[in-house]
Image (cartoon, helix red, strand yellow):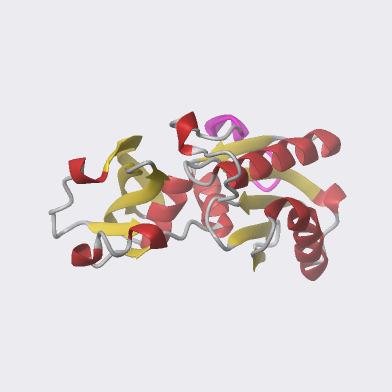
């Protein structure tokens, strides 16, 4: 039975999702070393869903911004698997998935980019689709204007204390949301519509955000 695979490795825990032609959605979360665990977790998810690799018709991957290591592993694995199976692969911003996960309304996404800087983006979710009003960027935390009490804020745990006055929610993009957004943009479980997605390449807004030896 035809199916789509979703990979989101920018947050911790990571997540996978499998959407089958019959509408069944299977999901899995995992932690630990992404590189060593990923293929094992994909195989486990597919066994649980009763799906063979040969039945995959496309792969959707979260491209960040976010963890340098997670993005590199996710995009490399997605492209390699797609190449081996001769199926399409496409990317969706992890910020889009986080905004969709947060629910209806306007959401600010703020992630630690290290060296006193943050990744910031803003968007609104309505009827299952996300409209970005501020593309992901790198800036100083004190440059953000987040006093709009009507807007929701999601952030990673490292910034929770600094943003506690805004009552932030946890940053939680999920692979299932990637597949939901892909379908909303015209992708089908038979592998059509991937031209609506971006390339499966990590969104590195600032290479210096990665520090040698850093695994996050």
Left or right position of 138 against 187: left
Q: Nearer the viewer, residue 146 or 94?
A: 146
Residue 159: percent from the left, percent from the top?
34, 58
Residue 61 visible in image: no
Residue 50 visible in image: yes
Q: Nearer the viewer, residue 81 or 12?
A: 12
Q: Nearer the viewer, residue 29 or 110?
A: 110
Q: Residue at x 80, y 65 (%)?
A: 44
Magenta: main secondary structure equals loop
Residue 87: percent from the left, percent from the top?
76, 36
Left or right position of 149 against 124: left
Residue 188 is inside the magenta segment: yes
Residue 66: percent from the left, percent from the top?
49, 45
Q: Residue furthest front?
A: 213
Residue 191, picture quadrant: top right
Residue 67: percent from the left, percent from the top?
53, 46
The number of callouts visible is 0
The span picked out in magenta is 187-200
Q: Residue at x 20, y 45 (%)?
A: 142
- Name the image quarter holding the N terminus: bottom right
Figure check: 152 above or below 183: below
Residue 198 is inside the magenta segment: yes
Q: Residue at x 34, y 50 (%)?
A: 110
Left or right position of 20 against 179: right
């Amino acid at each position: 039975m035809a199916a789509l695979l979703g990979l989101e490795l920018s947050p911790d825990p990571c997540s996978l999702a499998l959407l089958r032609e019959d509408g069944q959605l299977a999901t899995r979360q995992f932690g630990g070393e992404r590189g060593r665990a990923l293929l094992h977790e994909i195989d486990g998810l597919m066994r649980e869903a009763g799906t063979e690799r040969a039945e995959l018709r496309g792969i959707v991957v979260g491209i960040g911004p976010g963890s340098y290591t997670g993005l590199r592993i996710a995009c490399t694995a997605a492209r390699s698997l797609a190449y081996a199976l001769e199926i399409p692969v496409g990317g969706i911003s992890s910020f889009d998935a986080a905004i969709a996960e947060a629910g209806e309304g306007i959401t600010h996404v703020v992630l630690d980019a290290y060296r006193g800087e943050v990744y910031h983006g803003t968007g609104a979710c309505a009827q299952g689709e996300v409209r970005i009003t501020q593309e992901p960027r790198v800036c100083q935390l004190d440059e953000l204007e987040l006093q709009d009490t009507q807007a929701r804020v999601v952030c990673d745990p490292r910034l929770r204390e600094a943003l506690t006055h805004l009552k932030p929610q946890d940053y939680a993009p999920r692979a299932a949301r990637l597949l939901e957004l892909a379908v909303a943009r015209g992708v089908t479980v038979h592998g059509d519509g991937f031209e609506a997605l971006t390339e499966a390449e990590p969104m590195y807004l600032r290479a210096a955000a990665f520090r040698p030896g850093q695994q996050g």
